[in-house]
Amino acid sequence: MDIKAYIDSGILELYVAGTLSEKENREVYDLMLKNPEILKEVLDIEAALTKLTAQASPSSSKYIYNTIKEKLGLSSDNEEPKVITLNKPKNNWFSYTGWAASILLAGGLLWTLNQNKALESQVSTINTNKEFLEIQIENVNSDLADTKKLLNVLRDENIITVPLAGQAVYPEGYAKVYWDKNDQTVYLDLQGLPEPPEGKVYQIWSLTLSPLTPTSLGTIDDFKTDANKIFTLGNANASEAFGITLEPAGGSESPTMEQLYTLGVVASS
């Protein structure tokens, strides 16, 4: 349906005036419930009619009264009125009440819709907050579990502790390796190293000394985002020392000795 053409047709003015048939009134009423533009137009017409009525001049009341008397066949001399036949008017009660009921119903529907939207927004916010809280709790529980595991590792008497001292490129640097031979795992505490430059990563090396043979244990790719600076790597090598170098992202096949940040030898047992 072309809503603009329907509004321009004048049928809404006739609806407000109460001159439509009952079937036509029903059709307009149903369209008002379905289409906000039609509902708004009816409200505007009704408001304009009310305003126009209120602005009628009181001084014209006598003229209107006399006109009515003439139409009824009454003279100013109180003559007997002429008998005139009046056609029984159409019962347009539905016409006058239809638009009022539609306004109330439409207003109620709009209010209910707004309330539902507000409620849906609140429920969505609550669910989002709940999910966020659940994630936070899960992260805290995971961190606690990791911390407990790390503490158990550090307190294990079978763990080999290897301090790594700063080298020429960064003398004030330091790190520490906790090596669990049984688990073939090393835990690295890199709190004493600076944040690597963009495009660079720290690479961890297991070393045998005679002859000097480096074996990469991997790179530390999340150094910037890890708050504790504690990292875990596998180590199935017969390590005699550990070193840390600064390498291009992705790592190197062999250590860049000019970028050796820390080095430490495994104590003889």
Image: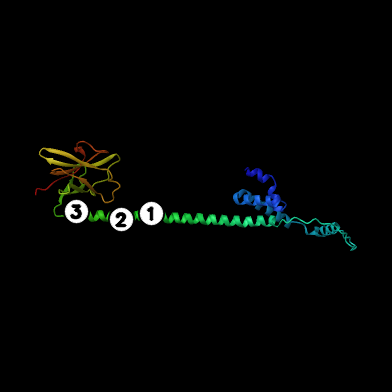
Closer to the camera, 123 or 147?
Answer: 123
Residue shown at 62% from the left, 57% from the top = 104
Looking at this rendering, what residue extends furthest in the left direction? 269
Left or right: 112 with respect to 15?
A: left
Q: Is residue 203 visible?
A: no
For image coordinates 32% across by 54% down, the residue present is 138
Q: Residues within 10 Å of mark 2 (few under 14, many from 20)?
A: few
Residue 143 badge: none
Q: Name which quarter of the figure residue 199 lies in.
A: top left
- Residue at the image position 26 percent from the left and 55 percent from the top: 145
- Circle 2 is placed at which residue position? 140
Q: CA distance from mark 2 to mark 1?
A: 14 Å
Given the image, on which type of amino acid does mark 3 rest?
Answer: Val
Q: Is residue 159 left or right of residue 121?
A: left
Q: Earlier in the sequence, mark 3 or mark 1?
A: 1
Left or right: residue 46 compared with residue 138: right
- Of marks 2 and 1, which one's residue comes earlier in the chain? 1
Choose mark 3 or mark 1, whichever is in front.
1
Q: Which residue is mark 3?
A: 153
Q: Secondary structure at mark 2?
A: helix
Q: Are marks 3 and 1 in contact (CB under 8 Å)?
A: no
Residue 246 versus residue 58: which sits nearer the camera? 58
Look at label 1 and name its amino acid: Glu
Q: CA distance from mark 3 to mark 1?
A: 33 Å
Please give the residue where the numbered disc 1 appears in the rendered image: 131
Residue 198 in picture, x, y percent from top left? 30, 40
Question: Does any portion of residue 129 appear in the rendered image?
Answer: yes
The crowding category of the residue bearing disc 1, from other C-alpha atoms within 10 Å (few below 14, some 14 to 19, many at least 20), is few
Residue situated furthest bottom in the rendering: 78
